[in-house]
Amino acid sequence: MSHAAFLAVALLVFALPLAYAATPDQWRGRSIYQVIIDRYALPDGADPNQCPPGTRTWCGGTWNSLRQNLDYIQDAGFTAVWISPVSQNYEGPSTPYGDPYHGYWIADASQLNSRFGTSDDLKDLSDELHRRGMYLMVDVVVNDVMATSMTPDLSTYMFKEQSQYHPYCVIDWSNTTSEEQCWLGDTVVPLPDLNTEDPTVVAGFSGWIQSLVKEYNIDGLRIDAAKHVDIGFWPVFCGNASVFCIGEVFGSDIDDTALYQGPNALDSVLNYPMYTALLDAFTIPGSLNTSAVADLIAQEAAKFKDPTLLGNFIENQDVPRWANLSVDPQSLYNAMVFNFMTDGIPIVYYGQEQGFSGNSDPYNREAMWPSKYANTTTYQLMTTLNQFRNFLVNNTQWATTPTQVLTTSPYGIATLKGDCVSIMTNIGSPPQNISIPVYTPYPASTSLTNILTCQQWPVGSNGTIDAQYSLGGVPLILYPTALLQKSGLCGNSGTTGSTNYISSALPIHRPVVSLSAVLFSLLLGSLSYFL
């Protein structure tokens, strides 16, 4: 190889971005903080009073302002951030439903949304997350585009041919084909449905997502409206993305939802069936039906390919805030403990920890900055939950160990996952003269520690634990005291702060074979010629 050729290869190698692929196994141990970019943080100098609840226009958040305010998320122990869609949205006069501040009204999916910043800004956000040992999940919309008439000008979209869209029809919610091919939205703001069975659409989206993931070093995708797309589209799309894909399958039916996890669909789905069960079990006022949760744990073990990959949540941009549905803060704490300490990947929607209480869209998409990012009781709880869960993930087989139900009573439910016993109750804050007996696999006199309070809990005869609520309905997380060494919890040595703890969780990207790797090998071979 000539000297000039050697230099050309060297320049090409080092100019190309490295390609990474975060696998489902790597995502299993992560915890996710969900952000709507426009609503999380303002740039310096912006008016902090410009975004009252219910606002349906832009408030000013950007990729840069999120990057500059990541400490709040990392200090709470989160190891991944899910951001709202990055693609270009409708640009025009405000609609009767406001402006596309949320990012879901797609115009040209192949272009970035300039409202949130530049290509370099998005790369800087990705780089900063990875520097901190955190993953980036990006929301993507492939089901539809946004229009302001029933006959839009297709030349403004990524796909410009009429054959690349399904004809307009009203969705019949009892028919799967209708759900996949008819249009979401309405006649005021219609969402023309893309024909994802069309080979040109499949090829176009496959090339786009492969390029997007590589250019911005994206670690995972959240798929909007996944059940409204032909299910056969997903293995091709996610195969080209080569990263973890978790889909939105809105609805409480477990059989319908379970169809979308597996080799012929997606890696994972958001766990709407369990969300519904948690509402039934813990919201006050409510039915307080804890058996719904126990039953669903058993059903999910039987029907899902891998329950440990499901996305656990109690809030997001499409459902009311928990505090809008339940008046008692202990109901929130118990539901959060369940989501962190059982099978699945915990997801916290921004502001959940600040007690936001908006009902439906747009009131559940509040600006974050009026909270002043306070160190609330809920923030402290999720910090402890993250620190303990990260310790378990990094030091044991906890993440892949299936959850078992130990006890169900009208007052709560107890689970075992790995060596950890979690007891959640629905009685609320007022003290009550009741108890929940829990039978554990531990020998009598085993010393357990409640990692939420650091109180010692000896195991009684026959492995029993008696959860009493004379101080109100607090959740319990009990772990063998002898196993807490190096956890940094309850006086044990180890990581002392959540920021250091998360930073020590090394980014475990798995390189994929790429042109860069091939060229690099050529470069190494060429070096021997000159040495």
Image (tube, helix red, strand yellow):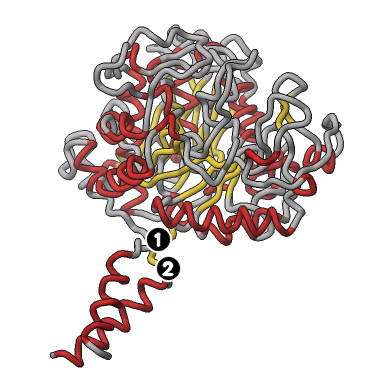
Using the image, tell me which numbered label, if any, was put on residue 197.
Answer: none
Find residue 20 and name its label: 1
Q: Residues within 10 Å of mark 2 (few under 14, many from 20)?
A: some
Judged left or right of residue 387, residue 360 is: right
Q: Is residue 471 above or below residue 25?
A: above
Q: Name the residue rendered at 19%, 90% in the picture.
A: 528
Q: Is residue 3 visible?
A: yes
Badge 1 amino acid: Tyr
Q: Does the image show residue 464?
A: no
Judging from the image, what secondary structure is the residue with disc 2 in?
Answer: loop
**Mark 2 or mark 1: whose residue is earlier in sequence:** 1
Query: Element under label 1?
Result: strand
Is the residue under label 1 in contact with that under label 2 (CB below 8 Å)? yes
Judged left or right of residue 80, residue 109 is right
Q: Amino acid type of disc 2?
A: Val
Task: Pick the residue in front: 389 or 192.
Answer: 192
